[in-house]
Amino acid sequence: MRAAIVLPLLLLAANAGARELRVCADPNNLPYSNARGEGFENRIIALLAKDLDANVRYTWWAQRRGFLRNTLLANDCDVVAGVASSMGMLGTTDPYYRSTYIFVSRADRHLGVHSLDDPRLKQWMIGVQLVGDDGANTPPAHALARRGIAGNVRGYTVYGDYAQAAPQSQVIDAVARGDVDVAIVWGPTAGYFAAKQPVQLALMPVTPWLDGPLWPMVFDTSMGVRKEDRALRRELNAALQRHATEIAAILDAYHVPRVETNGDRVSPAP
């Protein structure tokens, strides 16, 4: 009888002392994350937590302006996945993937567009992701504006319709329906939602990948921690390195395009 009482108490004590990996993420942001753990960032976080012998505890917050200020920097969590490696306000891990903006068009149109300097872009209706309701523009929007391409551009907020299960799918849905001729979309979003369309879509990396000194089309992606959390960053770096093969398989399963850059050229990562 005594053993039957003591064993549950020991198990409770062990669980109470288990390490937590506190993560902040968006609860409705596929293909990256959602509250059901269906995003590729959810899966990568689970992989890293297992390596660190930690339990994941999520704090959910919509990725809008102020996301980092109200979550990681407010000490509500210790890790945020999917941040730009160059983000100076955070301590960032080594990149675990590099992706690019993508031209998306219907395959049956045979447009073959791959360059921002294609003269046909002045004639086509172009879908472009915007950062948010504040109207801040993504690098492709700035690149088009530099070329005098504005009147035939249709903007889609990168946040999408948050009442829907897949808010970011709107711009890809528009291509599939023929509402726009071509869209320029961040790679992971483009690859994931293009694979779910009832018609085949063509995806081509945007070139030049660096449009002037200010507007890169290619970005490295890291985990973000507070700058002072150097020990955690080292642990995450080691875990990312140990599980690089599994992470690549997860990204493949979500159709995330990864690239390398060489001069003006963009090529698939090996």
Image (tube, rainbow, N blue to C red):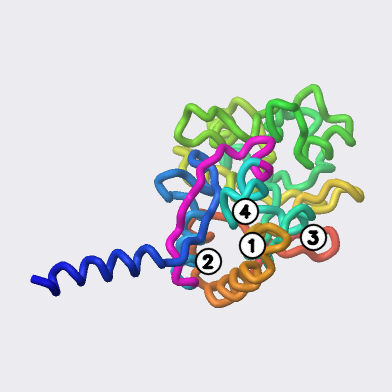
Q: Residue 97 carries which label?
A: 1
Against 187, residue 20 (above or below) is below
Specify which label sits upstream in the sequence, 4 or 3.
4
In the picture of the structure, the residue carrying the numbered disc 4 is: 82
Dot 2 amino acid type = Ile
Q: Name the residue under label 2.
A: 247
Q: Where is residue 197 in the image (x, y as percent from the top left)?
A: 48, 39
Give the numbered dot on residue 249. none
Which residue: 61% across, 37% down? Answer: 109
Determine if residue 77 is in view: yes
Instruction: Find out whether the residues at labels 2 and 1 contact each other: C-beta distance under 8 Å.
Output: yes
The magenta-colored residue range is: 52-69
Distance between the alpha carbons at the discs numbered 1 and 4: 9 Å
* Distance (Cα) linking label 2 and label 1: 9 Å
Front residue of 236 and 249:
236
Residue designated by label 3: 265
Residue type for callout 1? Tyr
Q: Are marks 1 and 3 in contact (CB under 8 Å)?
A: no
Distance from the alpha carbon under mark 4 to that under mark 3: 24 Å
